[in-house]
Image (cartoon, rainbow, N blue to C red):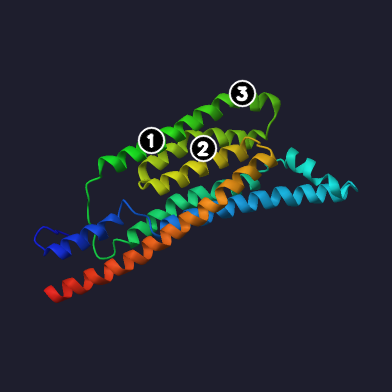
Amino acid sequence: MNASSEPESIVELTREYGAYGWERSGLGLVLGDFLLGLQVGVTLGGQLGWAVAQAVKSSDPRGWPALLREGMAMGHPAIVAIILVPPLLWLVGKELIRRRYQALGRVRLTEMPSLRMRRIVACVLMAFVSLCFLCLMPMAVREGWNSGTALLVAGLFALLFPLASWRVVAPSAEALIALVFHVFVLSALMGAKGTFLLGMGVMVAPAAFLGGLEGMCQHLEFRTIKKRLTEGRESEA
């Protein structure tokens, strides 16, 4: 698609349309915030349910806060898989959505230096988080913070997720989702206590809601851009 020969209005619309192929996320942002909220909610719900069930089982219903602080072990392979699915599903799903935003033809835009810098900063932060968790890994193995399977998966996730994010994370909002996913998944796999995960959940919930709202606004704006671009080309035909 060559926008240089089009009228100025079509050029501007084409540029806005092309931004959804890289700079903006639209429904990809909604998907990320939904999966992040779902993961946090399911994890915290499981922790809280486990604490209450154990308190009732021990005939001390009022003792569930202490059990929540201790936290449920999340080393079972099924639980590890549940923890891993949301971030991986988001990385794949948002790229499929991005392709849908190029249904009228792919527009290649030059990556702005500021956008590239945000992507670099996000990946550097994720690499720093990975380094911190990897430094704690010997202690986690020695003291049995979680099962061997969970700790092994945590190590692989710490190494591979920043690399995968570098290739597919562009907007700053996507970078923030990737960073929160990274911290939460590593914390859960490394055996973080229930109260720590609860604190993360309290911080994540409003951010996920606002991020999803932003993504929906971007999607509605895209529909307007696509409609105007289609009408403009039909009138030029």
- Name the element at disc 3: helix
Observer-nearest of 84 and 231: 231
Instruction: Tell me residue 76's x, y (percent).
Output: 68, 43
Residue 47 visible to an observer of this rendering: yes
Which of the 4 quarters of the picture holds residue 115?
top left
Q: CA distance from mark 2 to mark 1?
A: 19 Å
| Residue highlighted by disc 1 | 121
**Amino acid, disc 1:** Val
- Name the element at disc 2: helix
Q: CA distance from mark 1 to mark 3?
A: 27 Å
Residue drawn where x is 65% and y is 27% of the image: 141
Residue 157 tag number = 2
Query: For the residue carrying disc 1, how many other residues have a C-alpha within 10 Å: few (<14), some (14-19), or many (20+)?
Result: some
Disc with the residue nearer the chain's start (2 vs 1): 1
- Left or right: 230 as drawn, with respect to 56: left
Instruction: Tell me residue 237's x, y (percent).
Output: 12, 75
Disc with the residue nearer the chain's start (1 vs 3): 1
**Amino acid, disc 3:** Pro
Instruction: Tell me residue 30's x, y (percent).
Output: 46, 58
Disc with the residue nearer the chain's start (3 vs 2): 3
- Name the element at disc 1: helix
**Amino acid, disc 2:** Phe
Instruction: Tell me residue 152's x, y (percent).
Output: 58, 33
Query: For the residue carrying disc 2, how many other residues have a C-alpha within 10 Å: few (<14), some (14-19), or many (20+)?
Result: some
Q: CA distance from mark 3 to mark 2?
A: 16 Å
Q: Are marks 2 and 1 in contact (CB under 8 Å)?
A: no
Which of the 4 quarters of the picture holds residue 154?
top right
Q: Is residue 60 above or below residue 102?
A: above
Q: Is residue 82 above or below residue 26?
A: above
| Residue highlighted by disc 3 | 138
